[in-house]
Amino acid sequence: MPKYAQNLTLRDIKLLTKPGLYSIGYVPGLCVRVTTAKTSYYFRYQIQRIPRVIVIGDIKFITLNQAKAIAHDYLQERRKSGKIYDDYLNSIYRQVYPDFPF
């Protein structure tokens, strides 16, 4: 039986102070990494049983809803094609941040 993470709100995420990687629910693989310097959203997945991690971004610059949408898009692309491409990642970031230089 798979484990399901409790859906954390932005308030719950900001209350996390102990460094570590926490699953925040909503989308399978969506996590938040807390360090002493910053807190960032991550998306974890596997290709041929090799764990992979994609950094979505810092919580100061990306909202929880944007992180959920980006992780959902990653998951859909992964299920559809079996791969996640860097070009696809950049296209998502261009939609979220059109003025940011890539």
Image (cartoon, rainbow, N blue to C red):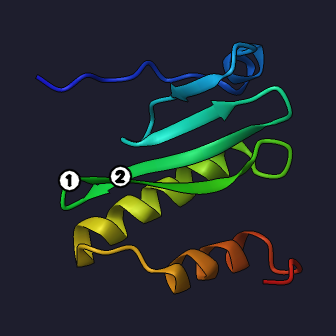
Where's the C terminus, which quadrant? bottom right
**What residue occupies the far left of the structure in this picture?**
1
In the rendered image, residue 77, in percent from the top left (x then y), is placed at 35, 71
Q: In this view, does 65 lie to the left or right of 3?
A: right
For the point 49% across and 23% down, the residue is 7
Tell me, for residue 45, which label it has, or none: 2
Q: In this view, does 82 lie to the left or right of 67?
A: left
In the rendered image, residue 82, in percent from the top left (x then y), is placed at 23, 73
Query: Which picture quadrant has residue 28?
Result: top left
What is the total number of numbered labels drawn onto the structure image?
Answer: 2
Crowdedness of circle 1 by 10 Å Cα count: few (<14), some, many (20+)?
few
Q: What is the spatial separation of the Cα atoms under label 1 and label 2, in whole angstroms?
A: 9 Å
Going by the numbered disc 1, the residue's amino acid type is Arg
Q: Residue 13 versus residue 39: which sits nearer the camera?
A: 39
In what element is the residue under mark 2?
A: strand
Where's the N terminus, which quadrant? top left
In the rendered image, residue 37, in percent from the top left (x then y), is placed at 86, 33
Crowdedness of circle 2 by 10 Å Cα count: few (<14), some, many (20+)?
some
Q: Is residue 44 left or right of residue 4?
A: right
Going by the numbered disc 2, the residue's amino acid type is Tyr
For the point 49% across and 50% down, the residue is 43
For the point 52% across and 80% down, the residue is 86
Tell me, for residue 59, which label it has, or none: none
Q: Residue 58 versus residue 80: which sits nearer the camera?
A: 58
Q: Closer to us: mark 1 or mark 2?
A: 1
> Label 1, on which residue?
49
For the point 35% across and 52% down, the residue is 45
Q: Is residue 65 left or right of residue 100?
A: left
